[in-house]
Amino acid sequence: MGCVDEKPINITMPYLMDKVRDEPSAYLFLEKMRWQGRPFCPHCHGENVVYLNPLNGHSRLTRTGNTSQRRVWKCRDCVKQFSVLTGTIFHGSKIAVRTWIFVVFEMCTSKNGVAAREIERKYGITNKTAWHMLHRIREAMKNGGVDEMLGGPGHVIVADETFIGGSLKRMNAGTRRKAEAVQKVIPHGAKLGGPSWNKVAVLSLIDTTTGQVRSKVVADVTGATLRKAVAEQVHMESSILHTDEAKAYRAIGREFAAHETVNHAEDIYVRKLAGKIVTSNQAENFFSQLKRSLDGTHHHVSKKHLFRYLAEFDYRYSTRDESDTSRFVRLLGMVAGVRLSYRPLAAG
């Protein structure tokens, strides 16, 4: 993985700028990253394919009469044409492939994420286009690894929840009056699942054995809601659960092989039990990075798109022990079969 030539390389932005200078080189680079020297048809998955050379040797005409440097292949089995972009998050995009490669690399290497406004300024595209690009990349991040359940024999699962949203005391006078009016109808927003009317509850599950994390927006933090979210992601009967003293986890813990807790109310965050460490600090650390990044990079994230941002931070956290090159190449291998058009995205 991360091998463009014959030996492993360290992909950095200067390296990309040198190797990906124009559209033809961008196509070649993406083919090497995705196909690893073995091109295949995205329609029938066959490898009996042949490259179609342009008539003039370097470019071809589109149906509208424009010049394109797109590299086109043809499958000898299903007789369909395709490119390295077909059936991926890049499919149908009018953005230069070179730009796509740079933005994907930034998303993989920026610990605090990248804002759409920053992509707009750096690459000379509109804010809507940048916003759509980033969400398509997040869709690929969300697509990776979701088929595998967390946990297993001897695996420790750390579960904790947090709330994403603004604070009443930091709102301007007009917004605060509206918030107070809502809270008079629903005191403290308890029925909304958070300590405040406009906060969103997020549950994160971390497998400390594999380092994988899964985060999910939940309607509330009641035992029934959390139990359903945990059961969807974890092999409960064979795993060990570590949480704080929240009552919602008591019934859930009985379905695990063991359930150990730490009492945050008494400032106990780590304790030793039979020579083993019991803590939920892994989740606290993840939430700390998540909130700092949402506040400092994005400033505001809507509730309907929050799960996409969670997928982005889950991906980077789960691959934190890998190099930037490995994380980047891994993501390029996850872009197939992921489509996200603008209209349903904007409609939520």
Image (cartoon, rainbow, N blue to C red):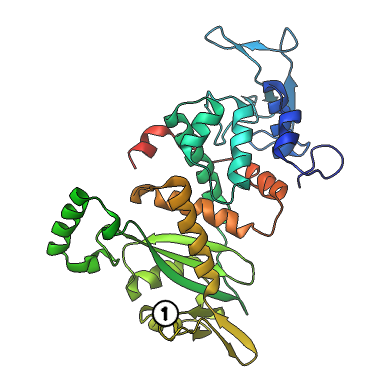
Look at label 1 and name its amino acid: Ile
Q: Which residue is rendered at x = 65% and y = 31% of the image?
A: 84
Label 1's element? helix
Q: Position of residue 294 (x, y in %)?
A: 45, 52
The answer to whether residue 247 shows anywhere in this view is: yes
Q: Which residue is rendered at x = 76% and y = 37% of the image?
A: 38
Determine the image quadrant of residue 73.
top right
Depth check, front residue: 129 or 237: 129
Q: Image check: 283 left or right of 108?
A: left
Does residue 31 lie above or below 278 as drawn? Answer: above
Q: Number of callouts in the render?
A: 1
Please name the residue that numbered disc 1 is placed on. 252
Q: Position of residue 247 (x, y in %)?
A: 36, 82
Q: Residue furthest bottom?
A: 274
Depth check, front residue: 122 or 75: 122
Q: Which residue is rendered at x = 58% and y = 58% of the image?
A: 317
Q: Image check: 79 left or right of 236?
A: right
Q: Position of residue 77 (x, y in %)?
A: 68, 29
